[in-house]
Image: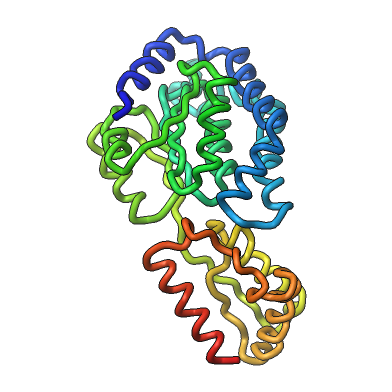
Amino acid sequence: MRNFRELLDQQKTYFNTDATKTYEWRIAQLGRMERMLKENAVSLEQAVSQDFKTAPQEKAFEVLAPLGTIEFTKSQLREWMKPMSAPVPKALAASGHTAQVIREPYGVALIIGPFNGPLTLLLDPAIAVLSAGNTCILKLAESIPATTTLLLELIPRYFDPKCVTAVYGSKEEVTELLKLPFDFIFFTGSVKVGKIVMKAAAENLTPVLLELGGQNPAFVDPTADIPDAAKKIVWGATAWGGQWCTSPGYAYVHESVVNEFIAECKLAVCGTLRGGPREQPGLLKDRQCQGRGAARFLDRSAESDRGR
């Protein structure tokens, strides 16, 4: 089992030197991330393709979205680092007192990435963490081996492990990782695992930011452009293999347009999937279609076939 404690202690020791608080250090880390993405864009897209079947433009988005975040962050960072004036009670203000909010980094952050959005939902939080003057340990998803293997190779090549490092491990190893006293935890994933993460964090009073999956309804009323609504909803439901956290899970459709909506959805599915789902045998990789999720997927496929 890897010594995660040693990694944490190494980053905490480095953070305590105050080196990460400077504008120059933060910009340097963003530059390293930018170079990693630009210089390895093709390899990263190929790795995502091996792990997670999705459209070419979505694979490109996995690289381009973090690059866009880096560009915007660089343009705003000096302003974000400035102290902010804060209100004080009237009596204190009258006597000349003022107050400021000075943004301070937390320390060492643990970022737990998901399998869907394998780059975007891992690296965007890392960009925020680094630009705020923190170091980070990236926990890579176990169900995307090609992407994980590539990141384990690239991250040590571009980053000092005292600043950024990546880890990968079994369920038992991750359990041990969560026991450590991180200064902040960012988790993207299911509600079930989110509860486990939050419970573990509570033992060390570690602040947590949870981005959890859920069901997202779409609403279609009689005033909608039905063909346009159907195309957008179908795209949202099939993008990233239907596993994106904002994918519409179901639609509430006014009874006066429900038949037209269903017909337009069928056309949109065939257009989006180039001949329909029957022509897309690899729509979901086996690794992403497990347990109860696989059962639901197969049940729905059977119901669809019976309805034909």
Nearer to us in this view, 242 or 188: 242
| Place of residue 30 in the rendered image (x, y in percent of width and height, measured from the top left) | 63, 24
Quarter of the image where the N terminus is located: top left
Q: In this view, does 63 lie to the left or right of 121?
A: right
Q: Which residue lies furthest to the top in this view?
A: 17
Measured as percent of width and height from the top left, residue 278 is found at 64, 76
Q: Is residue 93 among the parts visible in the rendering?
A: no
The reply, left or right, for residue 121 in relation to residue 68 is left
Relative to residue 37, is residue 291 depicted above or below?
below
Q: Is residue 230 above or below residue 201?
A: below
Image quarter for residue 263?
A: bottom right
Residue 112 in the image: x percent, y percent?
43, 40
At horizontal 42% and vertical 43% (from top left) the residue drawn is: 187
- Position of residue 250 in the picture relative to residue 202 (left or right): right
Quadrant where the C terminus is found in the figure: bottom right
Question: How far from the left and from the top, in percent, is residue 253?
Answer: 61, 82
Judging depth in this view, the residue of 133 and 295 nearest the camera is: 295
At x 58%, y 31%, the residue is 127
